[in-house]
Amino acid sequence: MTSPRVGLFGLFGSGNVGNDGSLVALLDHLRAARPGAEVDALCGGPETVTARYGIPAARLHWFRGEYRTAARPGDLAGKAVGKLVDAFRIAAWVRRHDVVIVPGTGILESTLPLRPWGMPYSLFLVCAAGRLLRTPVALVGVGASGTGSRPVRALTRWAARLAAYRSYRDTLSRDAIRAMGVDTRRDEVYADLVFALPTPPPGDSSGPPGPVCVGVMDFGGSNDERDRADELRRRYLDGMTRFVRALAAEGRSVRLLTGDDVDRPVTEAILEAVDSPMVTAAATASLGDLMKEMAVADTVVATRYHNLVCALKVGTPALAVSYAAKSDRLMAGMGLGEHCHPARDIDAGRLLEQFRALERNRTEVRRILAEGNPVLAGRVRRQFEALNALLPASGAAPDHARRETP
C-alpha cells in the first residue's frame, strides 16, 4: 500500500493567523478524507508549523536572511544566490509529492507591500516545477488582486497559468486573474477556507454587555502605495486611536486584537496613547483565539481581512475598516455592505456614527449572519469535494492524466 504524498505551500508559521487558519482548515479535511496521506509543508515558519500542527515542514528560503533588509553586500549576495538555490530546492521538494496544494490566503494578492522576488517568485517556481515534473499544483480558494507592478503581475500570471487547478474565495479574485490574461472559464469560486473551521459557542446574551473588539493592523497601504506608506500608517494609527479613545470615554470596554505579529506595535501605541483601564489587548496566536474573543463581544470593528471573517463566522455584528476591495466584497456578500469604513481615510467621528448605527441594528445583523454562515460553510464543503478528485487514494499510483492543466 502506498500513501499519497501531499505537499502544502504557503507563508505558514510566520505570524499571520489568517494564513495558518487556512492551513488548519485544509489539514482537517485531509485528515478526514485521506487519513493515510503523508503531508508536509514548505513554508515561512517550519518550526512553528511542526510544533503546532504536527506535520514535517521545510524552510521556504535557503538564505536565512531573506526577510531582512539587505543593507550589506553580504546580504545582497546571499539573497541573489538564494534565489538560484531556491529554484533547485523547490523543484526537489515538488518532485517528492503526488500533489502540491496552496490552501487559501491572499497568495495572488498585492493588497499589501511585497517584492516580485519574494512570494510571487517562489509561487512561480512551485507552479513551474509542478508543470515540468508532472506534479499537479492546486491553488485552492485563494485570493487575488490586480497590481501596477509589471514584474509581480507577470509572475502571478504565469504561476496561475501553470497551476493544474485554480479556485478562488471570491469573484473579485477570479476577475483579477482573468484581467491578467489567464483563462478562468473552468475556475470556480467557493468561499474562504476559514469558514470550514469549528465555531466556538456564542457568549451569554443574558449576562452583562461584552466588550467591543477592535482589530488593528500595521497598515501602510498596498504594494502600489509604497511612496505613501508612512503617511498612510500615521493617518490610520491616529484615526483608530481617536476611535478607541472615544469608546473608552463613553465607558465602553475595548479589547484590541491583531492578526499578525507585525500588528503588535500598533496595539502598544494605542494603549499608550489612550491610557485607560477600559482598553486592553488580547494575546491571540490563532484564528481560534480570535473567534473566542469575538464570540463574547457585543460588536467587532476589524481591519485585517481574516479578523473580519472571524467576526462574521461567530455571528457577532462587525464593522469593516476596509483596506482592500476583498473586505468590501465580503461584507456586501453577507448583506452588510453599508457597514464599511475606508482604512486609508479614517474619520473617527464618522466611524463612531457607523459603529452606533451597527449597534442599533445588532439584532437584524445577527439574523443575517445566522442565515449566511451555513451557506458559506456549504461552499467550502463543495470546494473540498472538488479537491478530492486531485488527491490520490491510499494504495493508488499517481494518475498522471490528472497532472495536466485543465
Image (cartoon, helix red, strand yellow):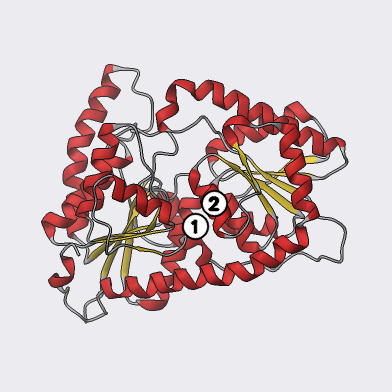
Indicate the amino acid at tag 1. Answer: Gly
The residue sitting at 28% across, 75% down in the picture is 389
* Quarter of the figure with the N terminus: bottom left
Left or right of residue 359: residue 61: left
Q: Is residue 396 left or right of residue 313?
A: left
Q: Mark 1 and mark 2 in contact (Cβ < 8 Å)?
A: yes
Q: From what the image shows, is residue 77 above or below residue 53? A: above
Task: Name the residue type under label 2.
Answer: His
Give neighbour class at mark 1: few <14, some 14-19, many 20+ (Cα, 10 Å): many
Q: Earlier in the sequence, mark 2 or mark 1?
A: 1
Q: Nearer the viewer, residue 314 or 84?
A: 314
Mark seen at residue 306: 2
Give how far apart the Cα atoms at labels 2 and 1 are. 9 Å
Front: mark 2 or 1? 2
Q: Quadrant of the C terminus?
A: bottom left
Q: Which sits in the foreground, 9 or 74? A: 9
Q: Position of residue 101 (x, y in %)?
A: 31, 60
In this picture, residue 225 sits left or right of residue 251: left
- Seen in the image, is 144 located left or right of residue 86? right
According to the picture, the residue beneath numbered tag 1 turns out to be: 21
Relative depth, front residue between 365 and 191? 365
Examine the image and state in which quarter residue 109 appears: top left
